[in-house]
Image (cartoon, coloured by chain):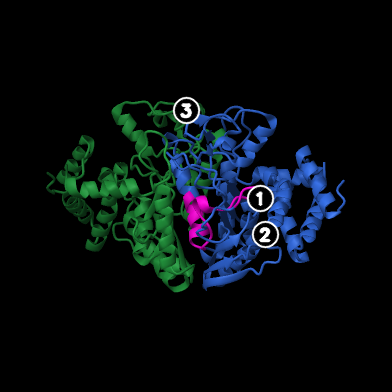
Chain colours: A green, B blue
Amino acid sequence: MYSYKQLFDFTEQVFLSMGCPAKDAKLASEVLLEADLRGVDSHGVARLSGYVRLWEAGRINVKPKVRVVHETPSTATVDGDGGLGLVVAPQAMLIAIEKATKVGTGWVSVKNSNHFGIAGIHAMEALNHDMIGMAMTNASPLVAPTFSTDRMLGTNPIAVAVPTKNQPAFVADFATASAANGKLEILQRKEKKAPAGWIQTKEGQRSTNANELKDGGALLPLGSDKTHGSHKGYALASIVDIFSAVLSGANYGPWVPPFVSFLSPPENPVGEGIGHFLGAMRIDAFRPADDFKEHMDNWIETFRKANVVKGQKNVVIPGDPEREMTEKRLKKGIPLLSPVERDLKSLAKKFKLKFN
Amino acid sequence: MYSYKQLFDFTEQVFLSMGCPAKDAKLASEVLLEADLRGVDSHGVARLSGYVRLWEAGRINVKPKVRVVHETPSTATVDGDGGLGLVVAPQAMLIAIEKATKVGTGWVSVKNSNHFGIAGIHAMEALNHDMIGMAMTNASPLVAPTFSTDRMLGTNPIAVAVPTKNQPAFVADFATASAANGKLEILQRKEKKAPAGWIQTKEGQRSTNANELKDGGALLPLGSDKTHGSHKGYALASIVDIFSAVLSGANYGPWVPPFVSFLSPPENPVGEGIGHFLGAMRIDAFRPADDFKEHMDNWIETFRKANVVKGQKNVVIPGDPEREMTEKRLKKGIPLLSPVERDLKSLAKKFKLKFN
């Protein structure tokens, strides 16, 4: 078990060692560690060495000049200057919030960025301003559209955070694939089979082999197959791709550069880096904030106390499991798998840092 | 087979007979008939008698004064005054487009409305203005959240329309349930079983009985079960509900009034009527419109020519099947099932109209 502070301090030191300015190193560490707190272990410190390798490959600019390249009162297009998405996305979100403060809503499409951690944390920033927050990002292609054998889309997540009064905030944050890649990675480590409906072989046949992606297979869109609505998951992932990258001028579809440094970005890119889309809507741009929040509390209470299938405790409100996990891990610490521990130890050695 | 003009003229006469002003009768007919053209037969003239029955029950105001009750430069909340959603939603969409023209984007939440036909047609209005259009609506509760036995959410559709240059527009329009109720109705008529993963019994067990809803069962969210991501479909339907109704002050969750006149609206409503959410984003609020459209063409061409699973023709671009159906039905006519024909004939009798 590691304390939040312990992992935070180490992560900050790593980003500082890469040459990030102090403010950026702190921000990037805060964003990254939220994944570990919220229980999305695949997106937290487990990825730290990945960011370092991308930086070593010259694919991350540690001193980006993030700037607005196009704007209207309610929109902006942001050039992330090749920076860490962990740093670029929060700045873009603040621009969205600033615009929403002035004209009711703010919408920012970002190009030339990198992986931004978990989508939820960016959407949640809006909660501090009595706003609904939205965050989405495209990602390197792992998902095959309905009927296709090609990996054309990332697991392209969508997050929406909604303010409340006395209830905890509603925070939805989900990949538009039937299962995120992180879940497959867990099965791979445990040498277990995957449920049918998550992946297909390179010929497009159903597979339960958790390692199928290494043999040219693909993840399936939310819905799994046409009969169960995979064309809807494919449409959702496409919308995320278009808003994040076609609007901003980032790479889209099969051109999105891979997160892993051992794979080169595709030749003849159609844009710059990866893309995000961030939005903020002021609650009181629609109705008095207090009215809205009271009804949101009622919404949440009503759903939470709905009748459940035998054996289940209650209907889960989006954001509940992650909030409970955060409380637990702040108190009891964050567990790391041994490969992650090894990774962090080798980073410590590389940068001459301490990691216990 | 019926010609578009034949069905349009009849529908317009019915709305006029109900007392709709000429302009509204025309608009409502245009919107309703789009469903028949696009092949969404459950949402077109098949519903005409349903609207009439709601009007007879005093639940539709045929002369609504649609008005903005709250606004900022990029947002508005619209009171539909109990009007037909077919008339209220297009007016709300025009407000969104007007705001987008001025400040880049426009977002309108609507309360006190009724069923608005297919979501896609409202989103598509934005295409005429070089804008991305979005439309969603809540609907009477038929879907159980993950783990629940209660119907808490409608099939709450989401539509997104994206402009292009030479390619046909990208138009996604889908229910956030694993299958829309219209598909079940078709199986009921044919006395066929439903695929596993669409519905559950009133105890929350999987069912293939297409009539299960009559026995207290429920539709399942997109994803079908927790393993395949039904919590994502439940989150999506919730987001639609919150944007459409908690933002506007309409009824949400289990309080959404039923479309069928033989079921009374729930007692102690939490808002007014049903709710919609409409949005428009000017393409050139993010980048020059021509740049965007060229890349959208490239996006579509790339996806359409992706490799396919053996036996499939090509990857389907959202909107393709509906556009092809529209071309076909404008040329060859619109087929109606005999119960729908009977329905229209009885409407003709009721209003002393001709229907051949």
Judged by depth in the image, the label closer to the viewer, 3 or 1, is 1
In the structure shown, which secondary structural element does the residue marked by tag 1 occupy?
A: loop
Position of residue A322 measured from the top left corner of the image (x, y, whole percent) = 31, 47
Q: Which residue is mark 1?
A: B261
Q: Which residue is mark 2?
A: B60
- The answer to whether marks 1 and 2 sit on the same chain is yes
Q: Nearer the viewer, residue A19 or A101?
A: A101
In the structure shown, which secondary structural element does the residue marked by tag 2 occupy?
A: loop
Q: Which residue is mark 3?
A: A201
Q: Is residue A197 left or right of residue A186?
A: right
Position of residue A248 measured from the top left corner of the image (x, y, whole percent) = 48, 58
Q: Residues within 10 Å of mark 2 (few under 14, many from 20)?
A: many
Q: The disc labelled 3 sits on which kind of residue? A: Thr
Badge 1 sits on which subunit? B
Position of residue B341 measured from the top left corner of the image (x, y, whole percent) = 80, 42
Residue B206 visible, this orientation: yes
